Image (cartoon, rainbow, N blue to C red):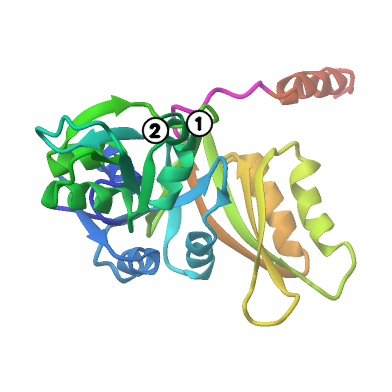
């Protein structure tokens, strides 16, 4: 039985993402911190791990990104994008007028319009799952818990309202960590850590040009301090394509010829729920080039 580690506790969006990506028969193990998940994969106590990577409203999860950049023996091998949707849960048999809700501060923030419209009191909890467990273990008339549906269902609470999040609905992206990454799927992304020479003007631009001149679309560029020297940054770069694709291979070879450090962080299939992107003009460019070649005499 394979082990898939995830950042716990049970009943969180990370738990839901782990359930979605785990092959049938895998054992899901909740760990307390993202570093523990990364170490479990690197040390071989888990075949895979999953952590939150970025949120559409709050941006990257910096602490998890730093762990991935610091790791050396695990790669990004998959992704799962989940809509951040919240539900209201009540204790069984509680029919008192709703007076307040508890949840993680992020959950309360995401449901601020519902809370304001109903003039509810709020109380912070360590996590959305903890809010449900506390309500289940110590019922409080007139109080509910705001959480993803999986959390309330696991705690045995009663669903009182669904989809209570604000109109600007968020999405969270989770990444799967493995010692190796899968082969090309036809719709992939690849990630690299780039550390340009800080004492040379334009060093980062030269690295980026290896992608742009080949028509490779960059989907993310994030800078993080190396934590070694003040003013020194490492860049997380994500692009379309698989490391096995010929055009990306040429770009990587170009990167390796330039001063600085280049580290491969993985190639993986995009979440199938992502909307398809408009096709680039590369096929038309190739056809035009082949028409030029046709005018060359053998």
Q: Position of residue 12 (x, y in %)?
A: 30, 47
Q: What is the span of residues highlighted in magenta in the rendered image? A: 270-279
Q: In which quarter of the image is the C terminus?
A: top right
Q: Residue 85 has which mark?
A: 2
Specify the farthest residue to the bottom. Answer: 229
Q: Magenta stretch containing residue 274, yes or no? A: yes
Q: Residue 105 has which mark?
A: none
Q: Report crowding for label 2: few under 14, some 14 to 19, many 20 or more residues within 10 A (C-alpha).
A: many
Q: Residue 169 has which mark?
A: 1
Q: Where is residue 244 in the image (x, y as percent from the top left)?
A: 54, 44
Q: In which quarter of the image is residue 118?
A: top left
Q: Which residue is drawn at 19% across and 32% down?
A: 96
Q: Position of residue 217 (x, y in %)?
A: 69, 38
Return the residue nearer the eye: 36 or 207: 36
- CA gap, disc 1 to disc 2? 8 Å
Q: Report crowding for label 1: few under 14, some 14 to 19, many 20 or more residues within 10 A (C-alpha).
A: some
Q: Is residue 23 visible?
A: no
Q: Which residue is drawn at 52% across and 31% down?
A: 187
Return the residue nearer the eye: 284 or 1: 1
Mark 1 or mark 2, earlier in chain = 2
Specify the farthest residue to the left. Answer: 93
């Amino acid at each position: 039985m394979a082990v898939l580690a995830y950042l716990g506790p049970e009943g969180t969006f990370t738990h839901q993402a782990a359930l979605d990506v785990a092959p049938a028969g895998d054992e899901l193990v909740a760990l307390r911190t993202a570093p523990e998940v990364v170490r479990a994969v690197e040390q071989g106590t888990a075949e895979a791990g999953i952590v939150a990577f970025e949120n559409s409203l709050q941006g990257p999860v910096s602490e998890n990104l730093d762990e991935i950049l610091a790791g050396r023996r695990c790669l990004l091998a998959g992704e799962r994008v989940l809509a951040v949707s919240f539900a209201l849960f009540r204790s069984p048999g509680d029919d008192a007028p709703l007076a307040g809700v508890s949840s993680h501060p992020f959950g309360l923030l995401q449901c601020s319009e519902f809370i304001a419209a109903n003039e509810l009191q709020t109380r912070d909890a360590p996590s959305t799952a903890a809010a449900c467990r506390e309500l289940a273990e110590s019922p409080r008339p007139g109080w509910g818990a705001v959480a993803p549906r999986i959390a309330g269902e696991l705690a045995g609470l009663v669903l009182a309202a669904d989809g209570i999040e604000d109109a600007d609905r968020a999405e969270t992206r989770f990444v799967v960590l493995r010692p190796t990454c899968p082969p090309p799927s036809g719709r992939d992304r690849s990630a690299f850590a780039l550390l340009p020479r800080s004492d040379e003007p334009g060093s980062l631009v030269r690295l980026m040009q290896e992608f742009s001149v080949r028509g490779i679309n960059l989907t993310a560029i994030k800078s993080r301090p190396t934590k070694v020297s003040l003013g020194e940054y490492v860049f997380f770069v994500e692009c379309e394509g698989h490391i096995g694709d010929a055009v990306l291979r040429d770009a990587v070879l170009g990167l390796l010829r330039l001063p600085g450090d280049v580290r491969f962080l993985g190639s993986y299939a995009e979440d199938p729920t992502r909307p398809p992107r408009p096709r680039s003009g590369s096929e038309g460019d190739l056809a035009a080039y082949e028409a030029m070649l046709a005018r060359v005499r053998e």
